[in-house]
Structure formats: structure tokens, C-alpha cells
Image: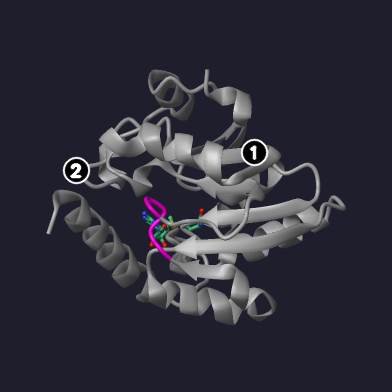
Amino acid sequence: MSDLDRFFDKVHSVLETAYLAHEEPWRQSGMSGPEERWVSLRRPVADCMDRSGALLDIGCANGYLLECCLRWTAERGVRIEPYGLDISDKLVALARMRLPAYAEHLYVGNAYDWMPPRRFDYVRTELCYVPGEHERAFVERLLREFLLPGGRLLVANYMEGDPRPERGVLPENHPTRYILDRLLQLGLCPVGYRDGYDPIKDRHVRVAILDATSIP
Ligand SMILES: C[S@@+](CC[C@H](N)C(=O)[O-])C[C@H]1O[C@@H](n2cnc3c(N)ncnc32)[C@H](O)[C@@H]1O
């Protein structure tokens, strides 16, 4: 087995076990409670969507972010068609139960090499889904092969500003403290961002927005 396969195996088993140990929907998506924390730290993803279209959540876990994005964007008259991808078959099974009307839109696969059956207006991801040395190629593939013309790639950093970001990722990952700095370091130019703040645990989130112009 290659180092890369070992990395994806570890991601799969560690996250699946951790998320399935809980009942609350936000915990099954990797965030400790209470629910207000989830809202403060995930609404910025929905804030990046200002027109109707198809959203692919890469690393959709139990589908709760997709469900919330549908609701949060609908409050502003924006209609999102949800799609999800996750490396864990068990988490995708939960997502299909949560979003039965969209069960056919929820896929099991590894974002590293998954071939999308269509393109999307919005794609949400995180850099930590691949080892640090693969981040640039990963983001570039999403920009070139996953987005519709005019589409936006939303790259979330849920450890934004954390003085020890390595605590939240595996040793093979790059510990990203500031998402805009990391993307610029990779030679990618974000076109905007949205922020979230959780006063309960003093945590910040930044969601960087990229588009076709982000590859120089
Ligand atoms: C923190 S959860 C994200 C949940 C939700 N989308 C959110 O943003 O809050 C990360 C999810 O990504 C999935 N994941 C990690 N690496 C992946 C990869 N290479 N391909 C597909 N899914 C992956 C994990 O199984 C996990 O369910």
C-alpha cells in the first residue's frame, strides 16, 4: 500500500469512527456543540452563495451542512441544488437518510481522484483532504474540472488563526493557520472570503472564494 493510500485510509477510519460516535447532527459532521457554534462557524459557507445554483460539498459527512445551506440560502431567496461527496460510505448513508430527496446526488468517493458526473456553480472543500504536497494540484483540479463557467470554489479553514493548527490535522497535512496566506503561497489568488466567529470557544473560520481567475 502506498503512503498516499495509507493517508486516505487513516482519514476514512479516524473521522468515520469519531463522527459516528455521536447523535447530534453537527457532531456527525465533526463539530462539538452546542448548535450555536455550528451556526456561527458554518453559516459563512452559505454566505458565499449569492445566486441560485448547484452546490457540491466535498467531505459532506452526514449531509448536515448541505441541509443547513439549503435553509440559510433560502432565507435570502437563493435556491441551492445540493450534491455531496464523502470518502466514508457510512457517513454518506446517513446523508442519504437526512436528504432523501437528493439521495442520488450523494456520492461515496475520494476527492483526490473522483470524477464528477457534472459541473457545479459552487464547490466547498478544505485543503486537509489531501497531504500538504498535493494541495496545489487538488485545488487546481477542482477549479478546472468541477466548476461551471462563473462558478466559485469555497475553501474553508475551520482552524483560522489558531496558533497551533497542527492539532486539527494529520502529520501529512500542511497545518494551515491563515487560508489566504496558504493559497497565495500555493500560487493561487482568492477573489474574496467570508468569516465566522464562535465566541463560545473563541474560534474563527474563514472561507476563501476562488474562481477561474484564481490560477494565474
Ligand atoms: C469536517 S467534515 C466536513 C463536514 C461538513 N462538510 C462541514 O464543512 O462542516 C470532513 C469530512 O470530509 C471527509 N473527507 C476527508 N477527506 C476526504 C477525501 N479525500 N475525499 C472525500 N471526503 C473526504 C471526511 O470523511 C469527513 O466526513
Mark closer to the observer (2, 1):
1
Secondary structure state at the residue bearing disc 1: strand
Side of 141 relative to 170 (left or right): right
In the rendered image, residue 110 lying in the magenta stretch gets the answer: yes
Q: Percent position (x, y) of residue 22?
A: 40, 75
Front-lying residue, 147 or 208:
147
Q: Percent position (x, y) of residue 132?
A: 28, 36
> Which quadrant is the N terminus positioned in?
bottom left
Amino acid type at circle 1 is Arg
The residue beneath circle 2 is: 171
Q: How many marks?
A: 2
Q: Residues within 10 Å of mark 2 (few under 14, many from 20)?
A: few
Task: Identify which residue is drawn at 62% across, 43% down.
Answer: 147
Q: Is 95 rendered above or below residue 74?
A: below
Dominant SS of magenta comes to loop
The answer to whether residue 38 shows anywhere in this view is: yes
* Circle number at residue 125: none
The answer to whether residue 155 shows anywhere in this view is: no
Q: Is 179 rendered above or below residue 57?
A: above
Q: Percent position (x, y) of residue 70?
A: 72, 61
Amino acid type at circle 2 is Pro
- Ligand 1 quadrant assignment: bottom left
The residue beneath circle 1 is: 152
> Which span of residues is magenta-colored?
109-113
Front-lying residue, 74 or 216:
216
Q: Residues within 10 Å of mark 1 (few under 14, many from 20)?
A: many
Q: Mark 2 and mark 1: span between their CA atoms?
A: 29 Å
